Amino acid sequence: MLGVISINANGVRAAHKRGGFEWLKAQLDSTAVDVVCIQEVRATTEQLHEVLDQAGLSHLHVAHDSSERLGHSGVAILSTKPLSEVKTGIGPKEFAGTGRWVQATIDTSAGPMTVASVYVHSGDVEKPVQEEKYRFLKAMTKRFTEAQKLDSLFLACGDFNVCHKEIDIKNAKANVKRAGFLPEERAHFDTWFNAVGVVDLGRSIAGEVDGPYTWWSWRGQAFDRDTGWRIDYHVANKPLAARCRDVVVTRAASYDQRWSDHAPVTALFEL
């Protein structure tokens, strides 16, 4: 089996202080997990390597797309396997240096597998960043269309900052006009999973049930009441989707044990 974890770390240095990298190391040491995709690294490449050294993970292969805005965004791939064909940026020049897309290829028993760590804008309906978010989602559609035509394996995972369906959010009616659950955002997901044909592995495994949620606000009683959003995804082309055996959301046992406002999501593949 080959496991791929996706986690928005809320900053790798803060996550390390909260015990997050101790948890990640345990998963990697178990041999069930080979790849970790991180979003919101919020650090330089040098600082990321410092965290990995402190966590006893200096042996990992690393691909990192940092943001030119210090302390913002940033995506990374950590792997026990060598990484090749590393590419940063999703394509359009406006997203270069924004720390939102990094991809690399690993060798598997079924051939090469491209893995991308992705961080989509949170958005704001009253600001220009919302239009930027739409352009980024459109660029993802192009990437997914290309991936679906491949015979090789493709996986994009990360914080996509959109709940696709009402079952992906606790209070759908109250959030229908908020970024993250806007009809215009969700329409891109309809295109991906219907017209394009890539697969939402988390939903495919869970079925048509509420959640499982992957993000809860730090504020109030959101976590204790499970008032969550499912905004973290593993999206695969069909050759890889056929090999997915499970997707697990590791929700912290209690509020005090959280090391991010997101839960790690692990996809397991027969590879």
Image (cartoon, rainbow, N blue to C red):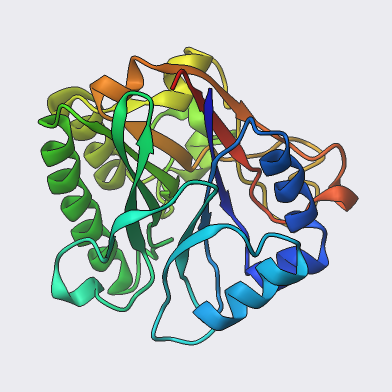
Question: 31 and 15: which one is in front?
Answer: 31
Q: Residue at x 68, y 59 (%)?
A: 57
Judged left or right of residue 9, residue 199 is left
Q: Is residue 258 above or below residue 207?
A: below
Q: Image point 31% across, 71% down: which residue?
A: 129
In the image, 64: left or right of 30?
A: left
* Residue drawn at point x = 12 percent, y = 47 percent: 142
Total numbered circles? 0
User: Is the residue 211 above or below the residue 177 in the image?
Assistant: above
Q: Front-most of 65 and 128?
A: 65
Relative side of 2 to 130, left or right: right
Q: Nearer the viewer, residue 211 or 20?
A: 20
Whole-percent x, y for residue 46 in the image:
56, 82
Residue 256: x percent and y percent?
89, 52
Quarter holding the C terminus is top left
Q: Which quadrant of the structure image shows residue 98? A: bottom left
Is 166 placed left or right of 261 in the picture? left
Q: Position of residue 60 (x, y in %)?
A: 57, 57
Asked if 191 appears above or below 269 in the picture, the reply is below
Q: Position of residue 260 (x, y in %)?
A: 70, 56
